[in-house]
Amino acid sequence: MQKILVQGGIRLDGEVRISGAKNAVLPILCATLLADSPVCITNVPRLHDVLTTAKLLAGLGAGVEHAGDVMTVDPRSVNSHVAPYELVKTMRASVLVLGPLLAKHGVAEVSLPGGCAIGSRPVDLHIKGLQALGADITVDHGFIKARSNGRLKGARHVFELVSVGATENVLMAAALAEGTSVLENAAMEPEIVDLANCLNAMGANISGAGSSRIVIEGVPHLSGCTHAVIADRIETGTFLVAAAMTGGRVTVTHARPGTLDAVLDKLRETGADIAIEGDRITLDMHGKRPQAVNLTTAPHPAFPTDMQAQFMALDCVAEGVGVINETIFENRFMHVNELLRLGADIRVDGHTAVVRGVAKLSGAPVMATDLRASASLILAGLVADGDTVIDRIYHLDRGYENIEAKLGALGARIRRVD
Ligand code: EPZ
């Protein structure tokens, strides 16, 4: 099993290119199943979850070509409507084929995605939303079995809770439904805007994506298109936090500054200077130690839960005390125990962590438990005294393209070891 070795103490300096967004490309690849002809997706990040999704689409019979950062999916040869447990258990985003298969083929069987390290991750909101469009859905023997008698019917649906995945599944299904759908209390993440833009390029008629009210006029057919995936706002935030923690100066390029305002505001609170110029964001810490920040995670445009672990790592070495509230997932403090091994001072009380900044962390062997927790351990290793070895880094490869090469280009002493 591969590990990553980080030797702390280097101030990061330089430029890094941001890849396409994992949480945009996964639903967009599933949306290709809605089309009557091949769909070409560009700026596709090289991530394990992308390879898993490609395998899932190929398993359904679609033609999938993947060269560099371009993936072309030909849905015309789809001949199966079953997403198997073997794949779904490795990536719960596989559930996003449910809406497209149902809308296009009238039938879908998707293994119930299990929970994961950060929570039970139910899919009840996905199911209720699709039932609102007329789907007949049962769940038994670990499978979600969905079918529709003829075309789905447009409807007004209010999501009980804001859910990114449920919004995406229902949005994709509504695109081919008969009549108008209105989705209320919809998630507003930039990845949903990107999905809607791709669907509209395929011939859909969607307005309001990015707001809590999305209106979809269903169309009978969707065609292929070429769509470039937006930049990954969480990768962007992760590199900027690395710059702030090490007191360095980093410019991220090919980014989408407008998609991470809450993160940039928090970084300014740590004392960082931030300059924005088109698709470039430069964070300069001028060698200073960051000030601790308080944060509460919440749906977009508020502070993203996917940046919580990274900011906890920053608070571990900041001046002062930071209070972190995680409101989205019930178990997203798995990185705390590993940060404590590095000498951090963190006290957890339910969904709240109180982090008292220490002058120095000390390197040690630690274990990644989930994607963003592994990122926070790398960040802590960048500033810890001595060597930090992070195990189970397959979590990391799910969501970060070549992170050690990108950090190495900024001066970090980081490499994979067996
Ligand atoms: C997406 O997950 C992202 N994943 C997550 O990123 C992200 O943390 C999350 O949105 C929140 O922003 C992808 O886009 C592939 P939700 P998703 O449905 O859609 C509850 C990362 O690190 N809920 O918005 O699964 C759920 O348990 C990953 O890149 C239900 O109760 O998140 C959670 O408490 C981690 N019933 C809350 O809603 C449902 O049917 C928000 O979940 C669905 C969700």
Image (cartoon, helix red, strand yellow):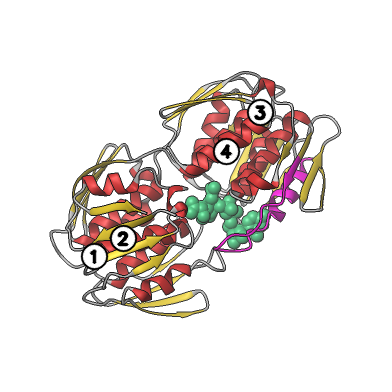
Which of discs 3 and 2 lies nearer the camera? The answer is: 2
Confirm or deny contact between disc 3 and disc 2 (CB under 8 A).
no
The amino acid on which the numbered mark 4 sits, given as a three-letter code, is Thr
The amino acid on which the numbered mark 3 sits, given as a three-letter code, is Leu
Q: CA distance from mark 4 to mark 3?
A: 15 Å
Q: Disc 3 designates what residue? A: 34
Disc 4, SS: helix
Circle 1 residues within 10 Å: few <14, some 14–19, many ≥20: many
Give the mark nearest the N terminus, 4 or 2.
Answer: 4
Give the mark nearest the N terminus, 3 or 1.
Answer: 3
Q: Disc 1 designates what residue? A: 383
User: Residue 31 placed where, x, y %?
Assistant: 61, 33
Query: In the image, 234: left or right of 128?
Result: left
**Which image quadrant is residue 36 in?**
top right
Q: Is residue 169 magenta?
A: no
- Region rendered in magenta: 109-134
Which of discs 4 and 3 lies nearer the camera? The answer is: 4
Q: Disc 2 designates what residue? A: 379
Which of discs 3 and 1 lies nearer the camera? The answer is: 1
Confirm or deny contact between disc 2 and disc 1 (CB under 8 A).
yes
Q: Is residue 126 magenta?
A: yes
Which residue occupies 62% across, 52% down?
Answer: 185
Circle 4 residues within 10 Å: few <14, some 14–19, many ≥20: many
User: Residue 180 placed where, x, y %?
Assistant: 71, 34
User: Residue 231 placed where, x, y %?
Assistant: 39, 39
The amino acid on which the numbered mark 2 sits, given as a three-letter code, is Leu
Q: Disc 4 designates what residue? A: 53
Which residue occupies 40% across, 43% down?
Answer: 232
Q: CA distance from mark 3 to mark 2?
A: 40 Å
Disc 1, SS: helix
Give the mark nearest the N terminus, 1 or 4.
Answer: 4
Q: CA distance from mark 4 to mark 2?
A: 28 Å
